[in-house]
Image (cartoon, coloured by chain):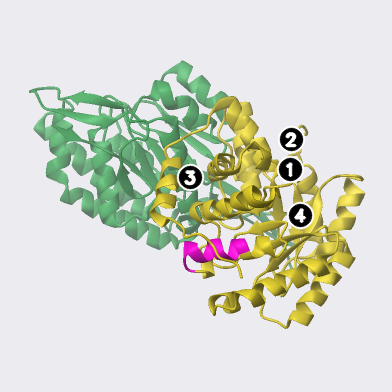
Chain colours: A yellow, B green
């Protein structure tokens, strides 16, 4: 049975409020922007997604901005399971040997409202199709009803179904209600074998927020102190501006240290963020404020 | 002493830079503080203008005209205050009143054009194949306006009205020597119910902001009021970055009838030509 320390909500909020009064400028900003870009899981999770759109997204993942070929690629492309094969093939064709992963949302994303058998089946299928990472959702209904062990068992089962693939566990913090619940769910997921814990599906508001992220990072930190194992973190949904992304990086650095400031341990789940980062990078280079008209949408 | 704000996204704020400059009345010891806007204020204003553009440009032209009538009405209601500010800026009482009246008239003039300029400037073109060929107007997008230095109200209104009546949104840099009425005009626009972000008004210095106003890649047109050759050169060079439309309005008597006309609306319209096959 997992037990979690209580969360100091006011303390968390105060700490986050202080972030708003800081700015990062010049070279540090440039480096941080490039780092943030390399940590993005470029995501498309619309029911209207097509293979064409996914291929386009992959091209952007490899080379985010044609005019600046020195920029890093993003960390991964995140799609629905039925488009994993398309993404995998597109990446291999366009950039053989690239290190960009393909992440698939699975387990009846975004609700998770299906039988465990089906969810495990979907996970195995996504891995078979070529997914390097699986983003699963927890059963929020069960969690909120107090069936914490059942939730943990499900995560363990999905982890097993993943095999070699990395598992990211989506807590959907927007539905958990309190920061104490966020902490408890984080601890559950970490103990059950999550490689990453992730805030949200992006389908529910509020999605990722800084206070929620800080609580999850503290859970990761405490687990590291206890076991020496490093679990990754992925805030997702609602992070659309470079400025906000930099604030996330500051929280990570302050809570977990330099070791986590790399794509293997920290990701942004985002679609619009990449373009805002690019806009800032081009602005730093040219000195002129940029327009989204000059960046590819997908 | 009164502190004037800047009008961005439908709200009155102080400049993010925390810098101010003082305006001293032409006569007497009346003075006011005004925001010395920074490039970040401008960037935020462009974001607001871009956000407002989609809805404003797709609103029915008649509705845009209606809003301009309402602005004219609200402006008339603020006659006393505007006239006082104009006097602080050096006009006589009679001249101030005349300037406010001319501004009201100017707004009504452009309000009337809202649903008519398309008929005047659009065309069905003769072509040698079996097509209908139409040319229609579309607003260019976000326009930055460097307002006239000398004519603080009627000149300002004459710069803004044709830009927004055509469906554009705009960011305005008010006259730095005569900035009072510009902020009050913002209050008028707000109380008349103009949607937030369609007009954004900054106060500050042209010498500092000219580069930003003309180089921002999300700005699609520049209206430059003035006659400084060096400034005009900067405007034209920077505008070339993303091929902004440039309109130059030299110093003139803004309240004269010749200062108004539908061509001011046309300055910030793109012409879209469509070929439509004729079924035979």
Badge 4 vs badge 3, beta-carbon distance below 8 Å:
no
Mark 3 against mark 2, which lies toward the viewer?
A: 2
Q: Which residue is mark 1?
A: A64
Q: CA distance from mark 4 to mark 3?
A: 29 Å
User: In which chain is the residue bearing label 1?
Assistant: A
The chief SS type of the magenta part is helix
Q: Is residue A173 magenta?
A: no
The span from disc 4 to disc 1 (Cα, nearest Å) is: 12 Å
Q: Residue at x 47, y 58 (%)?
A: B55
Left/right of residue B228 with respect to residue B127 in the rendered view: left
CB atoms of marks 3 and 1 within 8 Å? no
Figure quadrant of residue B204: top left
Decide: marks 4, 1 in contact (CB < 8 A)?
Answer: no
Front residue of B137 and A63: A63
SS for callout 1? loop
| Residue B115 in the image, given as x and y percentages of width and height | 43, 58
**Mark 2 highlights which residue?**
A71
Quadrant of the rendered structure where residue B241 is? top right
Quarter placement of the N terminus of chain A = bottom right
**Residue A77 shows which numbered tag?**
4
Do marks 1 and 2 share a chain?
Answer: yes
Q: Do marks 3 and 1 both belong to one polypeptide chain? A: no
On screen, residue B163 versus residue A24, left or right, reads left
């Amino acid at each position: 049975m997992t037990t979690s320390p209580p969360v100091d909500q006011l303390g968390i909020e105060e700490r986050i409020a202080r972030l708003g009064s800081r700015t990062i400028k010049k070279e540090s900003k440039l480096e941080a922007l490039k780092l943030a870009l390399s940590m993005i899981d470029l995501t498309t999770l619309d029911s209207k997604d097509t293979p064409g759109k996914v291929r386009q997204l992959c091209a952007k993942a490899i080379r985010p901005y044609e005019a600046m070929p020195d920029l890093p690629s993003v960390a991964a492309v995140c799609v629905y399971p039925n488009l994993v094969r398309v993404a995998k093939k597109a990446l291999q064709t366009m950039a053989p040997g690239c290190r960009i992963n393909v992440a698939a949302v699975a387990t009846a994303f975004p609700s998770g409202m299906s039988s465990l058998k089906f969810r495990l089946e979907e996970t195995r299928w996504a891995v078979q199709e070529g997914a390097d990472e699986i983003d699963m959702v927890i059963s929020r209904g069960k969690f909120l009803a107090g069936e914490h062990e059942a939730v943990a068992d499900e995560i363990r089962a999905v982890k097993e179904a993943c095999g070699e693939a990395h598992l990211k566990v989506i807590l959907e913090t927007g539905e958990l209600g309190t920061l104490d619940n966020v902490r408890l769910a984080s601890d559950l997921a970490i103990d059950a074998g999550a490689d990453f814990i992730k805030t949200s599906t992006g389908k529910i508001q509020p999605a990722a927020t800084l206070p929620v992220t800080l609580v999850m990072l503290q859970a990761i930190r405490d687990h590291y102190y206890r076991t020496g194992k490093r679990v990754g973190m992925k805030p997702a949904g609602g992070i659309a501006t470079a400025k906000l992304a930099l604030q996330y990086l500051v929280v990570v650095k302050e809570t977990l240290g330099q070791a986590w400031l790399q794509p293997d341990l920290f990701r942004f789940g985002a679609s619009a963020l990449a373009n805002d980062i690019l806009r800032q990078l081009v602005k730093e280079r040219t000195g002129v404020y940029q327009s989204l008209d000059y960046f590819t949408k997908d | 002493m009164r502190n004037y704000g800047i009008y961005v996204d439908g709200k009155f704020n102080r400049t993010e830079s925390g810098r101010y400059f003082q305006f001293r009345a032409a006569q007497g010891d009346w003075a006011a503080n005004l925001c010395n806007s920074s490039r970040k204020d401008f960037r935020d204003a462009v974001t607001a203008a871009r956000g407002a553009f989609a809805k404003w440009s797709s609103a029915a032209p008649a509705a845009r005209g209606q809003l301009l009538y309402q602005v004219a009405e609200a402006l008339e209601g603020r006659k006393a205050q505007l006239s006082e500010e104009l006097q602080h800026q050096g006009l006589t009482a009679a001249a101030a009143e005349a300037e406010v009246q001319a501004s009201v008239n100017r707004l009504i003039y452009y309000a009337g054009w809202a649903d008519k300029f398309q008929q005047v400037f659009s065309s069905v073109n003769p072509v040698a194949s079996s097509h209908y060929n139409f040319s229609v107007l579309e607003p260019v997008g976000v326009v930055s306006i460097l307002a006239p230095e000398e004519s603080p109200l009627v000149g300002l209104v004459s710069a803004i009205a044709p830009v927004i009546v055509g469906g554009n949104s705009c960011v305005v840099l008010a006259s730095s020597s005569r900035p009072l009425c510009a902020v009050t005009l913002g209050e008028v626009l707000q109380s008349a119910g103009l949607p937030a972000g369609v007009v954004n008004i900054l106060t500050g210095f042209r010498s500092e902001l000219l580069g930003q106003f003309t180089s921002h890649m999300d700005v699609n047109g520049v209206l430059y009021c003035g006659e400084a050759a060096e400034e005009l050169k900067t405007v034209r060079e920077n505008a070339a970055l993303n091929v902004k439309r440039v309109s130059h309005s030299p110093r003139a008597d803004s309240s004269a009838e010749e200062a108004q006309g539908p061509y001011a609306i046309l300055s910030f319209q793109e012409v879209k030509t469509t070929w439509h096959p004729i079924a035979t």
